[in-house]
Amino acid sequence: MAKPSSADGRTRSTVQIFIVVGLCCFFYILGAWQRSGFGKGDSIALQITKSSTECEIVPNLSFDSHHSGEVSKLDEAGSKPKVFQPCKAKYTDYTPCQDQRRAMTFPRENMIYRERHCPREEEKLHCLIPAPKGYVTPFPWPKSRDYVPYANAPYKSLTVEKAIQNWIQYEGNVFRFPGGGTQFPQGADKYIDQLASVIPIANGTVRTALDTGCGVASWGAYLWSRNVIAMSFAPRDSHEAQVQFALERGVPAVIGVLGTIKLPYPSRAFDMAHCSRCLIPWGANGENFTMNTIKLSMN
């Protein structure tokens, strides 16, 4: 058998080298192409993108501000805020829809005369109700619960009329509120303790309460420490500034009365309704007052 020559061996080696180099180049180019991300799907996406960006331009399209002309036409005098001057000092205690002189012209049946009666257009004041002379920033809570600067509500009638009931006491330049009330002259805290013995106040069942005929709102003021928020209301009557005292103390309160107009609260707004000698005729008018209050607290 003839031995292969060295020339044939070199030829085969050269061919193998070229094949290997060729394959390497091929796979290198293939990998670079794949890595570039430009495949069939990308070419399709490029065509769609190109076709979608070739949109028609509307010839009359305007990018100018459309309100620039209106601004220039504004009346400079009309653009200035209207300034209201202070009312005369005699209106310091004026409440437009609770004016006592107007109230006395309405019927007394069903407490109509104690409800809101707003003035006619020609009677309305167009001025700012002034604060009492010497008015100062109210005390922060909890001090405000017990003290109100005299200048903020300068009315002493309650210190005389309710003296034995401990509603309010005048001490120097401040009013002090011992926490008493018509039904609880010994203080609201003890009274609330008595209520808590039959009503689940401490466990969170009662979170909101409606205090009817609140006076100076000591009951609501002392409920804050029990995590109960009370809305207190009382009419604008001969007890001067009772609701004003409540507000100065930092207790939510409004001037209001149970009459022919429903209170501005929805059903289930309160977990509890409270009356402590509030002078509301619960049995009158077909017990209408009773039913309306029950709806507020129990519906």
Image: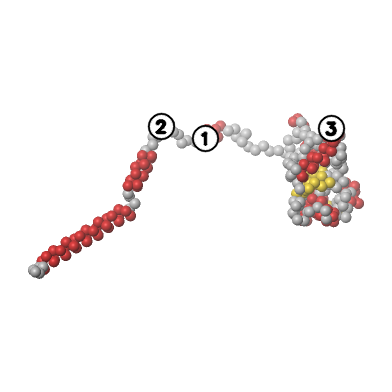
53 left or right of 29 in image: right
Q: Quadrant of residue 75?
A: top right
- Residue, disc 1: 68
Task: Give the percent coordinates (x, y) of residue 261.
Answer: 78, 36
Mark 3 to mark 2 CA distance (whole Å):
70 Å
Residue depth check, mark 1 versus mark 2: number of the one nearer the observer: 2
How many other residues sit within 10 Å of disc 3, few (<14), some (14-19) or many (≥20)? Answer: some
- Residue, disc 3: 106
Residue 66 in sight in this render: yes
- Report the amino acid beneath label 1: Ser
Residue at left offset 75%, top offset 46%: 270
In the depicted structure, whether residue 126 falls above or below residue 212: above
In the depicted structure, whether residue 266 falls above or below residue 25: above
Which label sits on residue 188?
none
Q: Earlier in the sequence, mark 1 or mark 2?
A: 2
In the depicted structure, whether residue 10 falls above or below residue 157: below
Using the image as rendered, state which of residue 85 and residue 295 is in the foreground.
295
15 left or right of 205 in image: left
How many other residues sit within 10 Å of disc 1, few (<14), some (14-19) or many (≥20)? Answer: few
Exactly how many numbered labels are in the figure? Answer: 3
- Mark 3 residue element: loop
- Tell me the quadrant of the picture where the N terminus can be found: bottom left
- Residue, disc 2: 59
Q: Residue furthest right?
A: 164
In the depicted structure, whether residue 173 falls above or below residue 101: below
Q: Earlier in the sequence, mark 1 or mark 3?
A: 1
Mark 1 to mark 3 CA distance (whole Å):
54 Å
Residue at left offset 75%, top offset 40%: 264
Task: Give the percent coordinates (x, y) of residue 282.
Answer: 85, 41
- Mark 2 residue element: loop
